[in-house]
Amino acid sequence: MDADLDHRQRDTIEKIFSHSSSANIEWRQVESLLEALGATRRERNGRLEVTLGGETEILDPPHGKDVDEQMLVDLRRMLANAGLAPQA
């Protein structure tokens, strides 16, 4: 895991990989994590195109504060492919 992440960002990665649902993972936490990881973001028609390493995902920002189940799946895939999955 990247040493430049603060404890909140590391906690967000842990939550993304450990929760079976998106409860208690807030969009603002995900945005902070993606920014700290150096992900590039581009808005397209209300959706976000996020690139991290060689992986690009199209994310729909939530209407509420918490991310939904599909975003959680997409984030797991993107982070794992970027080598950021927590060690078991």
Image (cartoon, helix red, strand yellow):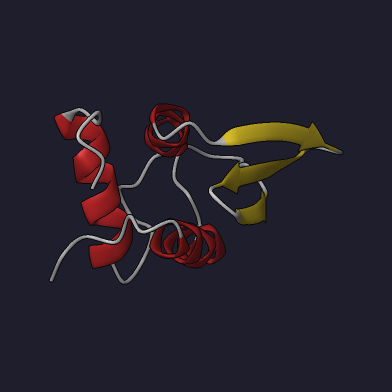
Please give the name of the residue rendered at 55% of the width and 65% of the height, measured from the top-left corner. 70
Q: 43 or 68, which is in the foreground? A: 43
Please give the name of the residue rendered at 29% of the width and 63% of the height, measured from the top-left corner. 17
- Which residue appears farthest toward the front when viewing the image? 54
> Relative to residue 40, is residue 35 drawn left or right?
left
- Whether residue 62 is visible to the viewer of this picture, yes or no, is no
Please give the name of the residue rendered at 41% of the width and 35% of the height, measured from the top-left corner. 37
Q: 26 or 13, which is in the foreground? A: 13
Task: Give percent across and percent down for residue 69.
Answer: 49, 65
Task: Give percent across and percent down for residue 11.
Answer: 19, 43
The quadrant of the picture occupied by the C terminus is: bottom left
Question: Which quadrant would residue 5 be assigned to in this image?
Answer: top left
> Relative to residue 46, is residue 10 drawn left or right?
left
Query: Is residue 3 shown above or below 70?
Result: above
- Whether residue 63 is visible to the viewer of this picture, yes or no, is yes
Query: Is residue 24 shown above or below 85?
Result: above
Task: Give percent across and percent down for residue 6.
Answer: 20, 27
Please give the name of the residue rendered at 46% of the width and 38% of the height, measured from the top-left corner. 27
**Number of numbered discs visible in the structure rendering:** 0
> Relative to residue 10, is residue 78 drawn left or right?
right
- Which residue appears farthest toward the right when viewing the image? 45
Question: Which quadrant would residue 29 be assigned to in this image?
Answer: top left
